[in-house]
Image: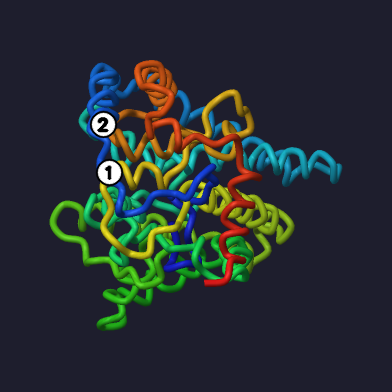
Amino acid sequence: MPHAMDQSLTLDRAGTASAAPTKVPTHRVADDKAMLRAAAEATRDLHAPSQAIYWGDLVASAVVGWGALVLAITASSVFVTILAGVVSMLALYRGISFIHELTHVKHASLPHFRLGYNALIGVPMLTPSFMYEGVHNLHHAKTRYGTSDDPEYLPLALMKPWTLPLFIVIAALAPVGLLIRYAILSPLSVVIPGFRKVVVERFSALAINPSFRRRMPEGAFRTQWNRIETVTSLWAITLVVLVATGTLPLRAFLIFLGVASAVAVVNQLRTLVAHLWENEGEAMSVTAQYLDTVNVPPPATLPMLWAPVGLRYHALHHLLPGVPYHSLGEAHRRISNVLAADSPYHQASYKGMPGLVWKIARSTMVAR
């Protein structure tokens, strides 16, 4: 879940931390034109999204995720409940990660995919597409990345050690925050003058920067937003009513919240290792932004689970945001083959999550 209600709903799409053998370059790094040119030339034919892959992956994730959740709820065995819950979490996490793709893909090339995402994942998981669309693109803006205007960036590596566990704990509360957002705040924002602006600004973006304030939607996007939010709000209210009346057993509801909370925590851990988080607010070159971001390519295998839908190539995605997730692996192979071993391109690749977490944790312990 790439985002957050300020910090509390962050999933994010969002990125995280990493380790490098030398001091990580920041805003002073100039663009490596050879790398940028080679990356563009090697991937010119990889920008078309495959409808079969997108739809097949999304539908399969939803079927497995919701099916495993039903099994977890109905199973009499604790072991089966836990195992099914883990499978459900991983599948729904993969499904919810498509919210990131929605912010980059040209919708004409994937007709009705936004509707499919919201129907299968976004609305039932209380993370509709509008919470990331119009937000994530700001993170990719060259003049905003890593600055105070970036909704998805905080200098986590330069903050106090206690901020990291807090960063994760907050994510665990995301499902409750989302339920409050749509079951309570949405209806209130319709009837209380001025409150709508507050809800849109502060509680309608999957972001980690607590100072970020979202603009009111306009035009066709506003109409789309209102329709999707209405459906999401009705779903959230229905859940509350079903639990309050005993129609939906409390155990089933708590298992659902537990799975959703686990999705948020895993996503937050991924976010923690998606960037190096060492920029202190200065504007950065494209190469510097790339080096502040993380790839976890093969032979590592676990990133397929904790960084799904192409998120294991997060640095490459920042370099080439127009390449669809299913082509990033091929893009990485091509670029790696054409660039020399001393190219900055290779400096953004890491072995896995443990080393990245330790790197950022160690950085927070250094006296400044």
Residue 344 lies left or right of residue 45; in this view the side is right
253 or 348: which is nearer to us?
348
Asked if residue 155 can be seen in this view, the reply is yes
85 or 214: which is nearer to us?
214
Disc ID at residue 55: none
User: Circle 2: is it few (<14), some (14-19), or many (20+) Cα within 10 Å?
Assistant: some
Residue 187 image position (x, y, % from top left): 38, 72
Residue placed at 76% from the left, 39% from the top?
83
226 or 61: which is nearer to us?
61
Instruction: Give the amino acid type for the residue marked by disc 2 in the picture.
Output: Leu
Residue 218 lies left or right of residue 227; in this view the side is left
Residue placed at 58% from the left, 47% from the top?
356
Asked whether the beta carbons under mark 1 and mark 2 sit within 8 Å of each other, the answer is yes
Instruction: Give the amino acid type for the residue marked by disc 1 in the picture.
Output: Val
Residue 255 image position (x, y, % from top left): 70, 53
Q: Secondary structure at mark 2?
A: helix
Q: Secondary structure at mark 1?
A: helix
Location of mark 2 (residue): 36
Query: Dividing the picture into quarters, in which one does residue 164 lie?
Result: bottom right
Residue 354 lies left or right of residue 281; in this view the side is right
Disc ID at residue 286: 1
Residue placed at 25% from the left, 28% from the top?
34
Asked if residue 13 can be seen in this view, the reply is no
Q: N-terminal of the two: label 1 or label 2?
A: 2
Query: Dividing the picture into quarters, in which one does residue 191 lie?
Result: bottom left
Residue 187 lies left or right of residue 86; in this view the side is left
User: Circle 1: is it few (<14), some (14-19), or many (20+) Cα within 10 Å?
Assistant: many
299 or 67: which is nearer to us?
299
Q: Is residue 185 above or below residue 102?
A: below
Q: Looking at this rendering, what residue extends furthest in the bottom direction?
A: 193
Could you give the CA–CA distance between mark 1 and mark 2, rounded to whole angstroms?
9 Å
